[in-house]
Amino acid sequence: MALILGIESSCDESAAAIIGTDRTIHAHRLQTQEDEHRDFGGVVPEIAARAHAHHLTPLIKAALDDADMTLADMDAIAATAGPGLIGGVMVGLVTGKALAMAADKPLIAVNHLEGHALSPRLVDDTLAFPYMLLLVSGGHCQILRVNGTGNYQRLATTIDDAVGEAFDKTAKILGLGYPGGPQVEKLASTGDPNAVPLPRPLLRSAEPHFSFAGLKSAVLRAHQSGEHNDADLAASFQQAVLDCLRDRLEKALREHGGMESLVVAGGVAANMPIRAMLEGLAAEHDMRFVAPPGWLCTDNAAMIGWAGAERYKAGLFDPLDVAARPRWPLDKHAQKARGAGVKA
């Protein structure tokens, strides 16, 4: 059994964790930056990077103290190397490099998306490759075939906005504050999901991808009209998202079947109506539905440590001059989606 120190700093969560290759979570520390960014209604990259520089060292020390371990007890250092806000990514990766060099330990540069993709396997030792993954977060919305560690086939992506971004922008339109996704979900639970006619972009489209920019704009227009209350608008927006996710997944399942499990991961995976829809869809296709607990869906170091553990077992290490990356696709062979920018 090996011990991996995981470090996460890709957006607005600073975190450190100690994870065993036997799936034991020996320690996990996380410092949110909600207070730093709340007044701006979203993450300010420069503020985020400075906060990571302030928080990471104490968090790492606290995690080691919680586990009653030292850096010498670690078998490898795993740090997020992208994708994400480049300032924060650089802070975490440089910290990981310094610790690896000082302790003479191997470095594992983790793709943040791989952290999400593999996170369900940290808490479910029966989840075997391959599985179909819906990866939904603030910056990404993809359907992937997860064949193994470092082996991913992208089946669909968003051609514009990610679903988490649409949730956050809807929250901002409705004046719900930051972070927006949980606020929209809470308000939607009191509204009528059929009250506001909103579009379902790419519903039943022949192409496999997602689109949420038009839905986000429609929410803004409906709100500006003054004809709908906020609860109904939040509920109708969430229902439109559910319909789009289900439609695109059904297409993927028809065309890329043969997997035993349907898995969801990423920050938006904490949304309970989305989980309920996915669980029903999996049952319709005689598949297992697997979702990590809510705390493991949002950005955290446990998933980075676990991705590091999976890569450690596969003998996948990185040189100390590995570069931080603001963009880093899991499937480097995937063709660019129609109209998609660099995020896709």
Image: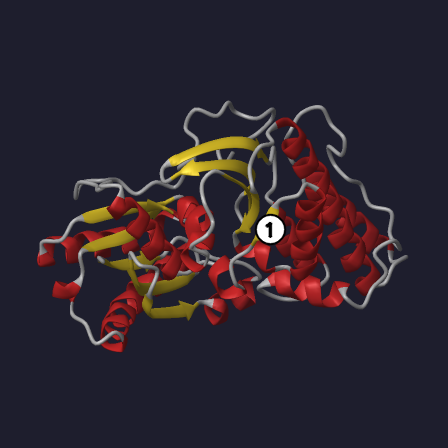
Q: Nearer the viewer, residue 67 or 77?
A: 67
Residue 137 visible in the displayed image = no
Residue 44 is left or right of residue 73, and the answer is right
Q: Secondary structure at mark 1?
A: strand
At a point 26% along the width and 68% down the height, the residue shown is 60
Give x and y (percent) for residue 112. 40, 48
State which quadrant residue 300 falls in: bottom left
At a point 22% along the width and 55% down the height, the residue shown is 77
**Is 230 rendered above or below residue 166?**
below
Give x and y (percent) for residue 36. 46, 68
Quadrant location, the N terminus: bottom left
Residue topped by disc 1? 289
Give x and y (percent) for residue 222. 83, 51
State which quadrant residue 134 falls in: top right
**Is 83 rendered above or below residue 169?**
above
Give x and y (percent) for residue 97. 19, 51
Question: What residue type is disc 1 on?
Answer: Phe
